[in-house]
Structure formats: C-alpha cells, structure tokens
Image: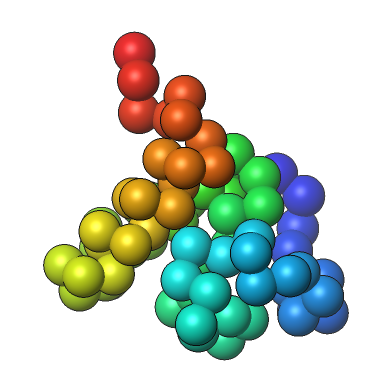
Amino acid sequence: MAKLTTSRRKALPKSQFAIPSKAPASGSYPIDTANRARAALSRVAQNGTPAEQAKVRAAVRRKYPEIGKS
C-alpha cells in the first residue's frame, strides 16, 4: 500500500472517505483503495462507535462489494 501523506489525504475528494462528513480529518477513514478499505474496517472495529462501524461497512460494501466475500 502506498503511503498516504497528509497532503495527499487532504487532496482526496470527500467521496473517497467512508465518513465524508469528517473528511479529511481524523476518523474519516479513506477508502480510495481496497487495501485502505480493509484497513478502515479494522480501525473502525477497534475504535469506532456502532453507528460509525455501520457507516464504514456500508461505504466499503458499496465501493468494494468483493471485500468480505469468500
């Protein structure tokens, strides 16, 4: 996974975040790549509220429907 610098994170459109209302601030979970989407799911499972977890799961499923399917 390529390093996401602060300037590159700020340059991402809000549509590339799982919780666009917080973007690009902390807790917005970038999902611009499949690897970052997986990381977002892991981070929100550890640190997010149940509402945030649901939002992130829904955003990842919309963008990457193959994630989570075996």
Q: Residue furthest top?
A: 70
Nearer the observer, 5 or 27: 27
Chosen colour scheme: rainbow
Q: In the picture provided, is 48 more to the left or to the right than 17?
A: left
Instruction: Point out residue 29 in the picture as x, y percentages from the top left corner.
Output: 50, 66
Looking at the image, residue 68 lies above or below residue 46: above
12 to the left or right of 68: right
Task: Point out the image quarter for the N terminus.
Answer: top right
Residue 24 in the image: state x and y as whole percent.
Answer: 63, 81
Q: Position of residue 23 (x, y in %)?
A: 58, 80
Residue at 53% over, 74% down: 20
Where residue 9 sits: x, y (%)? 73, 73
Give me the residue at 57% from left, 65% from top: 17
Tell me which residue sits at (66%, 45%) in the image: 33
Residue drawn at x 58%, y 54% is: 31
Front-most of 69 and 39? 69
